[in-house]
């Protein structure tokens, strides 16, 4: 607990955490604000398109007269929700892969890490575009689900989680390798604990810090991916707002109303940079001995062996 | 060394083969059916014609059989016909590949030309104002959504100032080199700024680590000039982790190129693949994806080989 309190003294943690807290509160308080302003974020008002800021519309209105501030907050709720849920899913997937690879070692480790490196090295965006364009009905999902409005959110969460797990897997594997040779783990094995029990009860709790750090960083990564896919029309589908898809329509009116293009992107930028500051600061505070992230990425190229005395 | 390269080339070929099957299967799951598309564009076709067309193109056969037929043709260089461009797929892809390589390599060069001096200067005095500024730049580069960065650059340099063209590759009727370079500025700027953060971060961190080593103190003590210490002794050792990051970054560089090309209507591979997927041009999308993956994996391999040049301790087996 001390370390957690100390971490707040780190400027990066205070800034990142503070900014994220404000964004979360604002985004999830949007309905309250909407009621207070007497506005409906989905209400179209074609007589007041692209209006300048006023008391009724603090940031003005968008291209079909909806209140920009409320849309930004609603969009933020969707983007933050997708970011957190997908990052958690990615963390579970990555932790599983990393834990098994690190603990079992040998060929399984080599195979799993080779897959992880392979995924990191691939050009992921075009592959995600293919996956996002798939016809879910041809995959055998029921039509009622596929045609529902929320499907675009579920799909984007699955997609970005599928590519977002690699960092967590690498970090968890590295941490598992260092924990597994410690005495308490050997004692548990000597007492006859099975592999699953050792991994879940004895090793996993000791990986909390690196997992939290990697997940925080993954939230930022995932929000960036969601925004670009939504921007390309393959992520969160209108009329549900997200910061990414708000930029799609803003692109067309950029000369008329540059503020529509400015704000959503700025919010993505601020959110992601806050996640990165928070993750980076937490890493130093919680895991001071861990070599910086440079160590987790400095994998050797496949099939290259360094001499043992290195 | 030769054996290592051959082995890695085999691995690349294996990855491409697996990828081609996965993508082939996935593309069959995309909305739209090639025969339906043909019928909808020609009112004279009846449903009996549709069945005959299906048989003609082999679409009534199982997936595995169709894949092998495609693979056999692909190995002879025949990737089929593009529906959107009404040309053989390879004829569409090759000129686009050149454009994308130009964009990616120019941006990567610019990114390193900026990141190397900045990272080294920052690492000389960790905690200084310059270091803090460079660190902020790293975070900004990693965190900025590149499509939004492109929008803002278009807004500033094209829409407001009018200095640079907002998109395209050349003014129509003007194919001169200065004109092409003029069109390249904003896309390169976007991709450079969006991809520089990661490299800068690792250069800075690796240099800080290296400059703490004893051999640096030795080099200084024997009176080596500051330039020689930095460039000769420190940089070479610092480059080892940096090259690892470089090797892994080609995939995301291509993803960045896709976004940049789409934003600036730049006729490259990324935009081509995106358009092909959305336009139901299956042959083109498949071949484009595989070509992009091959390019990325070969870039990866080239960076791996560069290791040996930097670190003679590494033995290739």
Image (cartoon, helix red, strand yellow):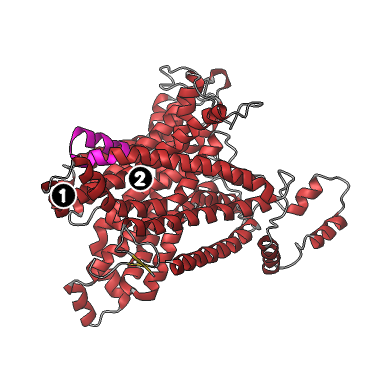
Q: Is residue B129 magenta?
A: yes
Query: Is B241 covered by the magenta stretch?
Result: no
Taking the spot 54% from the left edge, 43% from the top edge, the residue there is: B100
Q: What residue is shown with label 2?
A: B198
**Percent coordinates x, y for residue B111 in the rendering:** 39, 40
Host chain of mark 1: B
SS under mark 2: helix
Q: Report the quarter where the C terminus of chain A lies.
A: bottom left
- Residue at position x 52%, y 27% from top? B182
Q: Magenta segment, which residues?
A: B119-138
In the image, taking residue A272 as reference, residue B186 lies left or right, namely right
B296 sits to left or right of B70: left
Q: Is label 1 in contact with label 2 (beta carbons under 8 Å)?
A: no
Whether residue B41 sits left or right of residue A79 in the image: it is right
Question: Whole-Å distance between the Cαs marked 1 and 2?
Answer: 29 Å
In terms of depth relative to the viewer, which is nearer, B37 or B265? B265
* Dot 1 or dot 2, earlier in sequence: 2
Q: Do discs 1 and 2 share a chain? A: yes
Q: Which residue is mark 1?
A: B219
User: Would you place residue A194 above or below residue B282 in this image?
Assistant: below
């Amino acid at each position: 607990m001390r370390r957690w309190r100390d971490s707040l003294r780190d400027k990066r943690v205070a800034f990142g955490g503070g900014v994220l807290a404000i964004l979360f509160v604002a985004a999830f308080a949007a309905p309250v604000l909407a009621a207070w302003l007497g506005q409906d974020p989905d209400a179209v008002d074609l007589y007041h398109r692209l209006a300048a800021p006023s008391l009724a519309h603090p940031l003005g209105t968008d291209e079909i007269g909806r209140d920009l501030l409320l849309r930004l907050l609603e969009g933020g709720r969707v983007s933050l929700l997708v970011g957190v849920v997908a990052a958690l899913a990615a963390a579970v997937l990555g932790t599983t892969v990393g834990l098994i690879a690190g603990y079992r070692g040998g060929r399984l480790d080599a195979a799993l890490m080779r897959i992880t490196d392979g995924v990191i090295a691939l050009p992921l965006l075009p592959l995600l575009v293919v996956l996002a364009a798939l016809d879910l009905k041809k995959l055998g999902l029921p039509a009622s689900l596929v045609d529902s409005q929320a499907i675009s959110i579920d799909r984007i969460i699955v997609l970005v989680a599928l590519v977002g797990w690699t960092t967590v897997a690498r970090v968890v594997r590295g941490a598992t390798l260092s924990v597994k040779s410690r005495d308490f783990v050997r004692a548990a094995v000597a007492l006859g604990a099975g592999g699953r029990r050792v991994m879940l009860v004895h090793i996993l709790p000791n990986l909390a810090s690196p997992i939290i750090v990697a997940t925080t960083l993954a939230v930022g990564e995932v929000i960036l991916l969601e925004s670009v896919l939504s921007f390309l029309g393959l992520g969160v589908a209108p009329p549900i707002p997200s910061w990414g898809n708000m930029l799609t329509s803003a692109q067309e009116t950029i000369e008329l109303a540059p503020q529509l293009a400015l704000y959503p992107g700025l919010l993505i930028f601020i959110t992601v940079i806050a996640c990165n500051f928070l993750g980076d600061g937490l890493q130093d505070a919680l895991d001071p001995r861990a070599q910086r992230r440079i160590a987790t990425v400095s994998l050797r190229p496949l099939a290259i062996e360094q001499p043992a005395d290195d | 060394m030769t054996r290592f390269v051959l082995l890695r080339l085999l691995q690349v070929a294996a990855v491409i083969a697996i990828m081609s099957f996965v993508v082939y299967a996935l593309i069959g799951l995309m909305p739209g059916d090639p025969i339906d598309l043909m019928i909808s564009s020609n009112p004279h076709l009846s449903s009996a014609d549709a069945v005959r067309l299906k048989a003609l193109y082999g679409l009534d056969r199982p997936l595995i059989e169709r894949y092998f037929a495609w693979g056999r043709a692909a190995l002879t260089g025949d990737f089929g016909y593009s529906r959107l461009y009404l040309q053989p797929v390879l004829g569409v892809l090759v000129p686009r590949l050149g454009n994308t390589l130009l964009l990616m390599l120019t941006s990567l060069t610019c990114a390193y030309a900026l990141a190397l001096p900045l990272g080294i200067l920052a690492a000389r005095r960790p905690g200084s104002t310059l270091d803090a500024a460079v660190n902020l730049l790293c975070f900004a580069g990693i965190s900025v959504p590149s499509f939004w960065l492109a929008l803002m650059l278009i807004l500033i340099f094209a829409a407001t100032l009018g200095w640079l063209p907002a998109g395209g590759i050349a003014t129509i009727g003007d194919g001169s080199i200065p004109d092409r370079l003029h069109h390249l500025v904003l896309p390169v700027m976007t991709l450079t700024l969006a991809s520089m953060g990661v490299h800068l971060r690792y250069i800075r961190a690796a240099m800080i680590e290296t400059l703490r080593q004893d051999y640096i103190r030795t080099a200084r003590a024997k009176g080596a000039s500051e330039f020689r210490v930095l460039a000769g002794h420190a940089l070479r050792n610092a480059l080892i982790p940096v090259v690892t990051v470089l090797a892994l970054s080609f995939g995301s560089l291509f993803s960045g190129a896709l976004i940049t090309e789409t934003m600036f209507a730049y006729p490259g591979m990324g935009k081509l693949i995106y358009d092909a997927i959305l336009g139901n041009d299956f042959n083109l999308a498949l071949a484009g994806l595989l070509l992009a993956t091959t390019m990325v994996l070969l870039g990866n391999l080239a960076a791996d080989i560069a290791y040996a040049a930097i670190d003679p301790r590494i033995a290739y087996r």
